[in-house]
Image (cartoon, rainbow, N blue to C red):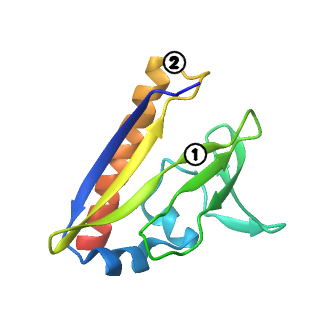
Amino acid sequence: MMLPARSFSVSIAMDARALYELIWQPEFFPKWALGLAESDLRMEDGRWQADGPEGPIHIRFTPHNAFGVMDHFVDTGEGPEIHVPLRVVENGAGAEVIITLFRQPDMDEERFAGDIKLVNRDLRALKKLVEG
């Protein structure tokens, strides 16, 4: 089954490689991705964990790579992991940060719209954090 998907992006005035090197680490996510977790990420039992809106969550991240891929996979403990593709790509002298949000099978339109707002808020927060 294919899931409905929406992609969102923000342009950031910084070299794409430099931006990726600054933000790829899981510990950096709580500084801007407030929609991901309601607490700092912590490593427990070999997995990243945090407090989510509906309880504890486990998060795994793609390893550091040369392609600007910062995907993460969220396990809420209910159903399969939620894949969140995230890319940093070159945009001229700057960078584009692109995130794709998949509407999960048990998610109604209202909840999906709420997640869309969170993603866009987080992208704006990242731009502000990086550009000052």
Circles 1, 2 touching at the beta carbon (< 8 Å): no
Does 107 appear above or below 66?
A: above
Give the amino acid at mark 1: His
Q: Where on the picture, by quarter, is residue 83?
A: top right
For marks 1 and 2, the one nearer the N-term is 1
Task: Tell how many labels.
Answer: 2
Does 102 appear above or below 24?
A: above
Q: Which quarter of the figure is the C terminus placed in?
A: bottom left
Residue at label 2?
108
Give the residue displayed 61% in from the left and 40% down from the top.
53
Q: Which percent across, then down, holds residue 103?
A: 50, 29
The residue sitting at the left extreme is: 92
Give the residue displayed 41% in from the left and 69% down from the top.
68
Give the residue displayed 25% in from the left and 78% down from the top.
15
Describe residue 15's horizontal placement relative to residue 81 as left or right: left
- Give the camera-side residue of 44 and 66: 66
- Give the camera-side residue of 37 and 100: 100
Q: Secondary structure at mark 2?
A: loop
Q: Where on the picture, by quarter, is residue 86?
A: bottom left
Describe residue 101's horizontal placement relative to residue 59 as left or right: left
Describe residue 106's horizontal placement relative to residue 77 as left or right: left
Distance, label 1 to label 2, CA atoms, is 18 Å
- CA neighbours of label 1 inside 10 A, class few (<14), some (14 to 19), many (20+): some
